[in-house]
Amino acid sequence: MDLLRLKYFQVVAKLEHMTKAAHALKIAQPALSMTIARLEADLGVPLFNRAGRNIVLNEYGKVFLERVNHALNELEAGRQAIADLSGSERGYLYVASTSMCNHFCDLLGSFARLYPKVNFHLTQTTDENTKLRLLESEEVDFTFTIKTFDQSGIVSNPLVEIDMLLAVACGHDLANRCTVSLRELAGEGFISLKGDHSIQKFCHTICQKSGFVPQVIYTCDSTQALINLVAAGFGIAFFPSPSKQRPNLPFVLIKVEDFDYKSYLYLAWKENRYFSKAAVQFREHVIQRSRAKNRWL
């Protein structure tokens, strides 16, 4: 059972779609299908339930995937350990985050200037459960999150406090206001992020307590898309307070009088796993740089 088969199986198991997996691996679909078939023949059991073009990981596949993930993670840790021992300044960092905007780019940019030979593999998701799964499976080294994970073996280090404001386009009727009450927003169209995004859920709960259900007219996959839609006047949105170092945004931010939201941005990682020198340096850089600043986006 060669290493390439295991890597191919890992990708197919993650995507549960042979064509998409073949595209991600940059190989022909028939070759990938044959590789998986040979792997199943070696094991003596099917790893997927098949229904036409759809494939779903079965119980055998789930058990095998857990072992494959562990084995490949250990091999990657070994490679990183050898690189560290050899004094190499090269390395890879796997990071997940909700947003690729201001604070995140500031951190990556400042770290990249210090360690230009370190390469980043970035995963963007608004789903906190996905972030937890990526940490537990060691597919990422770190994730930026707006909540702590109630899971043994996961560390969540608070970085900065977050306030929540209302974002409106520069030409909006509320743009000249310094403050606004929640009840005034009852007839407005809201823009929200998709997925299990705790901030958005909390904001909607507060609106309901004020007597109305926010009318969400657009949902988007990323913070940047939300910024663009608000700036273009498609709707309003709740938005975290911006960095003092990067205050310029293409819309107006207004304080909501009866809306007292405070949270934290966390850096989370899995305990008792191998971290490369690059990963350790990145963690120290993020924590120290965050302590030196008053606010981030």
Image (spheres, helix red, strand yellow):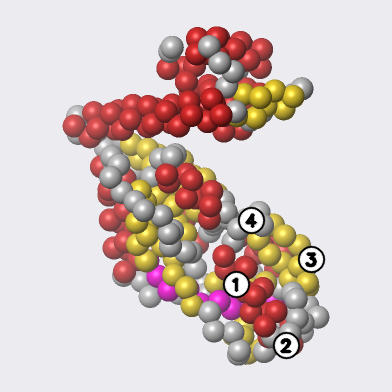
Mark 4 and mark 2: Cα distance apart in space: 26 Å
Residue kind at label 3, given as amino acid type: Ile
The mark nearer the N terminus, 4 or 2, is 2
Q: Are marks 3 and 1 in contact (CB under 8 Å)?
A: no
The mark nearer the N terminus, 2 or 3, is 2
Nearer to us in this view, 80 or 128: 128
Residue kind at label 2, given as amino acid type: Arg
Q: Which residues are magenta?
A: 159-171
Q: Foreground mark, 2 or 1? A: 1
Residue 161 part of the magenta segment: yes
- Side of 47 relative to 235 (left or right): left
Does 237 sit above or below residue 61? below
- Side of 48 relative to 170 (left or right): left
Please tell me in which quadrant of the rendered image residue 89 appears. Answer: top left
Residue 69 part of the magenta segment: no
Using a 10 Å C-alpha cutoff, classify the residue at mark 3 as few (fewer than 14 neighbours), some (14 to 19) or many (20 or more).
Answer: few
The mark nearer the N terminus, 4 or 3, is 4
Residue position marked by numbered label 2 in the rendering: 183
Coordinates of residue 24 in the picture (x, y in percent): 59, 28
- Whether residue 114 is visible to the viewer of this picture, yes or no, is no
- Side of 21 relative to 297 (left or right): right
Residue position marked by numbered label 4 in the rendering: 195
The circle on residue 217 is: 3
Mark 2 and mark 3: Cα distance apart in space: 18 Å
Residue position marked by numbered label 1 in the rendering: 202
Using a 10 Å C-alpha cutoff, classify the residue at mark 2 as few (fewer than 14 neighbours), some (14 to 19) or many (20 or more).
Answer: few
Q: Which residue is located at x 47 percent, y 59 percent?
A: 145
Nearer to us in this view, 52 or 260: 52
The mark nearer the N terminus, 2 or 1, is 2
Q: Secondary structure at mark 3?
A: strand
Residue kind at label 4, given as amino acid type: Gly
Mark 2 and mark 1: Cα distance apart in space: 16 Å
